[in-house]
Image (tube, rainbow, N blue to C red):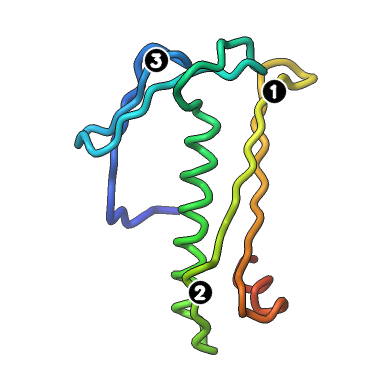
Amino acid sequence: MSVDVKYTTKATATGGRDGAAKTADGSFEVRLATPKELGGGGGPGNNPEQLFAAGYSACFLGALKFVASQDKDGVKIPDDATVTATVGIGPRSAGGFGITADLEVSLPGIEHAKAVALVE
């Protein structure tokens, strides 16, 4: 499946989990820190899983707004709608590491069946 790309961004990380990351345009820069649960010091900074959770939840909410805009019933995603991403990381039984991601969607004022249809 080909993609008609409308927007491209670029970010670079240095120093691994205890380094930094920033976008090429300089609009975003973050200090990285390994959480204690993964053997790090848990110092100031964010970790890649937090950044992934923030990006995934924001992207999913944006996609929901687009899907709703195409809906024949004219449903509008309310301003107080939220998507919360829970991201986990840990060792896999087969070796290496795996990532889990769960989304919790809140669409106040939208009938449950309609909300489920939009999310799916």
Q: Is residue 76 left or right of residue 37?
A: left
SS for dot 3: loop
Which residue is located at x 48 percent, y 62 percent? 63
SS for dot 1: strand
SS for dot 2: loop
Q: Are marks 3 and 2 in contact (CB under 8 Å)?
A: no
**Which residue type carries mark 1?**
Gly
Q: Nearer the viewer, residue 111 or 71?
A: 111
Name the front one of labels 2 and 1. 2
- The residue that mark 3 highlights is 19
Residue 78, which numbered label? Answer: 2
Q: Is residue 71 left or right of residue 84?
A: left
**Which residue type carries mark 2?**
Pro
**Image quadrant occupied by the C terminus:** bottom right
Q: Residue furthest left?
A: 25
Q: Nearer the viewer, residue 51 or 71?
A: 51
Q: Position of residue 57 (x, y in %)?
A: 53, 51
- Neighbourhood count class around disc 3 (C-alpha, 10 Å): few under 14, some 14–19, many 20 upward: some
Residue 80, which numbered label? Answer: none
**Which residue type carries mark 3?**
Gly
Mark 2 or 1 closer to N-term? 2
- The residue that mark 1 highlights is 90
For the image shown, how many numbered marks are present on the structure?
3
